[in-house]
Image (tube, rainbow, N blue to C red):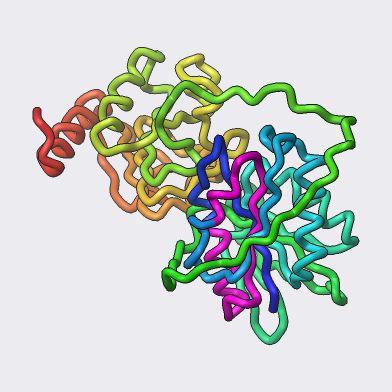
Amino acid sequence: MKVLALIEQRHGKLRSSGFEALSLAAKLAGNSADAAGVLIGSNVSGLATECAGYGADKIYVADQPELGLYNVLHYAKALEQAIKNFQPDLVIATSSPIGRDLLPRLAIRFDSELLTDLVALEVSNGKITGKKPMFAGKTIADVELVELSGKPGFVSVRPNIFAIEKPGNGTASVEKLTVDVSDNRLKTIEIRKGASEKADLTEAQIIISGGRSLGSADNFKILQSCADVIGATVGASRAAVDAGFAPHSMQVGQTGKTVNPSLYIACGISGAIQHLAGMRTSKVIVAINSDEEAPIFSIADYGIVGDIFKAIPLMEAKFKELLGHDA
């Protein structure tokens, strides 16, 4: 089976989810000759060398000044061209805003099938199957691509779910793509980047999130202080965002961002199903809440029943001790 992965980059830096997609493509393909990646942007040719060794023999690169800012019309043409050149059986992208934007368009262009937001994906006896959370994470559905008939199937997967594997230090050949960017029905004028230097929530390996019980935007500083010690990114529940304590860009949940960090620390978050839908697949969940009946404890690996304003500073002090930071 031939598998093509979309390797995402932002501002000239490869996203870890791109390596995840490439590793998954190589694993499903079974050999490096049947796995490839596609990289799109401006001044990104040099990034192709960073993709070597992740199990794919070929990287398609669309590198043009007009591709510097994301434009779905132009990016879709680049991905379509890579698909026609490589002739894959399966195309993989992560469930990022770009992946969710591109794959439905390509599935329609190829009159093919699409599976989205998978947390498991495998190929067995020629069948492509996966698992997908549904109904705000209340159930997991078994899904399958059933009628491809020689057409490529399309799949998006949740980031931080599949292991990044680099089996060797091999090289990958680079094939340049030239994209027709004359279609100007849609123009991207500017992409505004948040001021924070922390990893985006969808890329973060450690997240500390706060709920409405923090009481004010100013009180989120105790989360930020703790996050700085362990290199975490700060998130928030919808209740905290609605109360004006945090911007929507920090919101985790069904109407915010879906995250899958290695460690998720929920501070003063009760655990409404809408919030759980966005973080329940985290590898390890720690909950801090004064209400021992809070629903968040039902999915937490570790729970602390207590005052968050006492527990968080104690955690920060312990982290500093363990990491050898000055008090």
Residue 318 visible in the displayed image: yes
> Which residue shows up at 39% across the image and 13% down it?
216
Vertical comparison of 69 with 3: above or below: above
Residue numbers of the magenta segment: 20-48
> Which residue shows up at 68% across the image and 22% down it?
190
Which quadrant of the structure image shows residue 56? bottom right
> Which residue shows up at 71% across the image and 41% down it?
64
Q: Magenta span has 35? A: yes
Vertical comparison of 165 with 117: above or below: below
Vertical comparison of 147 with 189: above or below: below
Q: Where residue 238 appears, x then y in whole percent?
A: 53, 28
Q: Magenta span has 201? A: no
> Which residue shows up at 79% across the image and 41% down it?
74
Residue 274 visible in the displayed image: no
Q: Quadrant of the N terminus?
A: bottom right
Q: Where residue 209 appears, x then y in whole percent?
A: 40, 33
